[in-house]
Image (spheres, grey):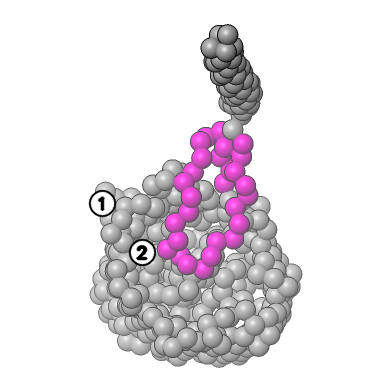
Amino acid sequence: MQKRIAMAAMLAATFGAQAADHSELAAIRAQIDDMKRAYEQRIAALEQKLAQAESRPAAKPAPATVQSERTDSRRPAAGPASGFNPEVSLILQGQYKNMKDVPERGITGFWPAGGHDHGEGAIEGISKRGFSVDHTELVLAANIDPYWRGQAIIAAIDGTAEVEEAWFQSLGLGHGIGLKGGRFRSGIGYLNEQHPHMWDFADAPLMYRALFGNHGSYTNDGVQLKWLAPTDTFIELGAEMGRGANFPGTDRNKNGSGAAAVFAHVGGEVGVSNSWRAGVSYLTTQAKSRAAHFAGTVDDEVEGLFDGRSQNFIADLVWKWAPNGNPKYQNFKFQTEYFQRREKGDLTCATPEGAAATVACDGMLSAYRTRQSGWYAQGVYQFTPNWRAGLRYEQLDSGRRDFGDNAAYLVVDSYRPKKASAMIDYSWSEFSRVRLQYAQDKSMFGITDNQVTVQYIMSLGAHGAHKF
C-alpha cells in the first residue's frame, strides 16, 4: 500500500513539473510575439516617415556665414540643383568729396590711362565733386560641385552695369595646385586683388592709377595657375595668361594670349604677435594704337598712338602686428609697394578726332622708349575695436621718356608727382564703416589740390573673408 502511495506521489510531481515547464515556455513565446509586433509597428512607422520625406522637395541649406580669414579653407560640397542657394552680397559705397575742379585730371608725366567709362559725357569718379555713389557691387558665389567654385561680381554706377569679375576656381586638384579661369583681378602686387571696399583709404594710390588707370587695378580675361608649397613658411607661386585688353595693353582681337604675368609670395610669423608677407611680380602686355592726348609745341593738342610692349615690375611688403595675435581690439598694418615700368615701341603722331585742322606732325612715326617708377608706403593703426587711423605717402618719377623725332611736336614733362593722405574711420561692425580722409595732392604740375573725402561702405549679406 505504501509503495502505491509513493509511486502516485512521484507521478503527480512529474506531471506538475511538466505543466510548469509548458506554462513558462508559453509565456516566453508570448513575449517574443509581443516584441515582434512592436518592432513591426515601429518599422512600419519609420518607413511611412521616410516615404513622406522623399515625397517632399529637398530642403535648402542654411544661409552661408562669413568665411574665416584662412583663404585656403575648403568649403562644403554643393547640394543638388533644387537646393541651390548661392552666397549673395551687396556692397554700397558712396562719398562726399571737396576738391578743385581740374579738367582732364591726370598724373603729369605719365601716359593718361583713362579708366572705367560708364557712359558718354559722364564725369569720371576721380573728378566727381560733391555727393556721389561709387561702385555698387552685387556678388554671387557658390560651390558648383565638390571640385569647383564660381563667383560673379556685377558693378553698377550711373545707370550702367558691367561684369567686373566672373570666374571659376578649383577646390580639389590637390598637391597645393589651384586653377582659376574667366575674368578676375590679377594676383600681381598686393593691393591689386582687393576691391575698393577693402582699401584702407578712400582712393587707390597714385602708383596703381599710373600702372592701370583711374580704376586702380588690373583685371584680365584668361587663366591663372597657383601652387602653394607644403612648408611651414608660406610660399606661393603663380602664373597667368590672358587677353590683355586693359591698360597698359589694348584689345587687339587676336588669337592666343595678349598678356602674361608671374608672381611669387612668401610669408610667415615672427613670434606670436607679428606676421608678414612679401612678393615680387612681373606683367608684360602688348599695345596697338594705344591713344592719348598731349599738349603740342606747335599745335594746341596732339594725339599720340603707341604700338609696342609694356613691361611692369612690382615688389610689395606687408607687416601686421596684433597683441598675442588677436587683432579684434588693437592692431597695426604697414604696407608698401614699388613699381618700375619699361615701354618700348613706336609712337605715331596724329590729328585728334574732331580737330579743326591737321596737326603739323600728322602721320609721323618715331621710336618711343620710357622707364618710369614709383612707390607708396602706408600705416594703419586700429586703437579700439571700432576706430582706426592711417597715414599714406606716395611719390612717382616720370623718369626717362624718349619720344624720338616726335619730341619736337609733343610737350614732354619731367615731373615727380607726390601725394600725402591722412584718414580716420569708424566701424560699427565688419559690415559697416564711415571714413574721413584729407589729402594734399601734387600729382599735377603746378597744382596743389587739398582734398576732403567723407566715405561710407556698407556690406549686405554673406561676404567672403578678406585676404591677408
Which image quadrant is residue 43 in? Answer: top right
Disc on res. 256: 1
User: Who's the residue at 26% across and 74% down the image?
Assistant: 344
Camera-side residue of 120 and 456: 456
* Left or right for 415, reference 325: left
Q: Which residue is label 2 attached to?
A: 249
x, y percent for residue 15? 57, 12
Element at label 2:
loop
Q: Is residue 134 above or below residue 171?
A: below
Camera-side residue of 367 and 276: 276
For the residue marked with disc 2, what is the amino acid?
Gly
Magenta residue span: 59-86
* Crowding near the residue tagged with mark 1, few <14, some 14–19, many ≥20 C-alpha atoms within 10 Å: few
User: Who's the residue at 60% across and 68% down the image?
Assistant: 197
Which image quadrant is residue 45 in? Answer: top right
Q: Give the CA separation, mark 1 to mark 2.
A: 15 Å
* Left or right for 173, reference 336: left
Which image quadrant is residue 366 in? Answer: bottom left
Judged by its main secondary structure, the magenta piece is loop
x, y percent for residue 51? 59, 22
* Crowding near the residue tagged with mark 2, few <14, some 14–19, many ≥20 C-alpha atoms within 10 Å: many
User: Who's the residue at 61% across and 39% down the image?
Assistant: 60
264 inside magenta stretch: no
